[in-house]
Amino acid sequence: MSSVLGTYARKNISFSKGKGCYLYDLKGEQYLDFASGIAVNSLGHCHEHLVKIIQEQSKKLWHVSNMFVIPEQEKLAKRLTDYTFADFVCFQNSGSEATEASIKIARKYFHTIGQPNKKRIITFKGAFHGRTLAALFAANNPKHIEGFDPKVDGFDQVPFADLESLKKAITNETAAIMIETILGEGGIKEVPDYCLKGLRELCDEKNLLLILDEVQCGIGRTGDFFAFEKSGIVPDIVPIAKGIGGGFPLGACLLTKKISVGMTPGTHGSTFGGNPLAMAVGNGVLDIILQDGFLDNVKKISKYFNRELIGLKKKYSKIILEVRGRGLLKGLKLAVDNAKFIETLMKHKMLVVKAEEQVIRLFPALIVSKKEIDEAISKINETCKEMS
């Protein structure tokens, strides 16, 4: 019997090593990894640049706490603010923590400017914002919140893509609207550009903050650094994690100068957040992703991937109902049970991720090659053939 608490429905398989887009089990069998640790291993497994950085930093300094100025943290924050909409960065260890920081920052902002009544946040059905208590009740998924009462108050949920319900939910207590730019766990459902623009306009009109959760869809996964960039809008707060650490625990909350006014010493903190080792890895990830042409290549390979997936949908229209997502964040909505589809795909030595609405999520590393895309298409093809 395992001594690990049974909070995960694990597959009966373990991996001993990984390289690029592949994982190897204890017997040495090779698996094509299109799960990427649930969109975490943005540069694949054991990327040479990240391995070198971790080795070098581990010999110098791991942790000192935020009682002191951390040069690696200052560097990563400056690079993020120089490249994005943000003026400040608050470093965390995970996506859940980044979401929690976003909630605190939004509430504290209105408290600081003399509107303490504005403290509620509107969220959307199908969302996933993390596993901490506030994040759980923000998403309000019945499967996730059962047994964790009393409810964490302060959130008003509306149906996804229901503008009228959203408008009706806004009151004089509403502080912010929080939404994933592309819903991940909820089934790879993209918020269209016109909707993002509409949300920005609504927030400006009603004096609300716009929080775009890019924990899963950000850091190059769509071919843009952030998924919202294509819409041309500027959010107020953006929590990130997953891809920014390339497999190392790292989260952050990005925000504008205007919204930062309430976050003074003592209002938030983290023992491990922003430690030198994590910051070195984050800088290493940016070294690669911000290289000239890198994101252009992500867009190029994404178009090929999308075209091939659409080809499979046409070929197996009774199995694949819809191809969703953008860039290298793709979803296949299935007419068959997605859990069984994933099991069959694993027999063909390919790993993917489950989502709501009978969707499977495909998260190849951003360094994926055309050859590896072709291999994935072949394995999905064989799985569809077996399940037809």
Image: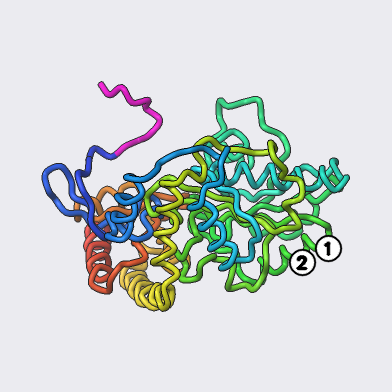
Quadrant assignment for the C terminus: bottom left
Determine whether the residue tagged by mark 1 lies in a helix, strand or loop.
Answer: helix
Q: Residue at x 64, y 42 (%)?
A: 138
Q: Give me the disc on residue 201.
A: 2
Percent x, y of residue 294? 40, 73
Q: Residue at x 82, y 57 (%)?
A: 207
Observer able to see residue 227: yes
Q: Indicate the colouring scheme.
A: rainbow
Q: Residue at x 77, y 66 (%)?
A: 201
Q: Which residues are magenta?
A: 1-10
Observer able to see residue 45: no
Between 325 and 111, the one nearer to me in the picture: 111
SS assignment for the magenta stretch, majority: loop
Q: Quadrant of residue 267?
A: top right
Between 44 and 278, the one nearer to me in the picture: 278
Instruction: Determine whether, in the image, residue 55 is placed left or right of residue 180.
Output: left
For the residue marked with disc 1, what is the amino acid? Glu
Q: Give me the disc on residue 205.
A: 1
Instruction: Determine whether, in the image, residue 100 is placed left or right of residue 245.
Output: right
Percent x, y of residue 103? 67, 44
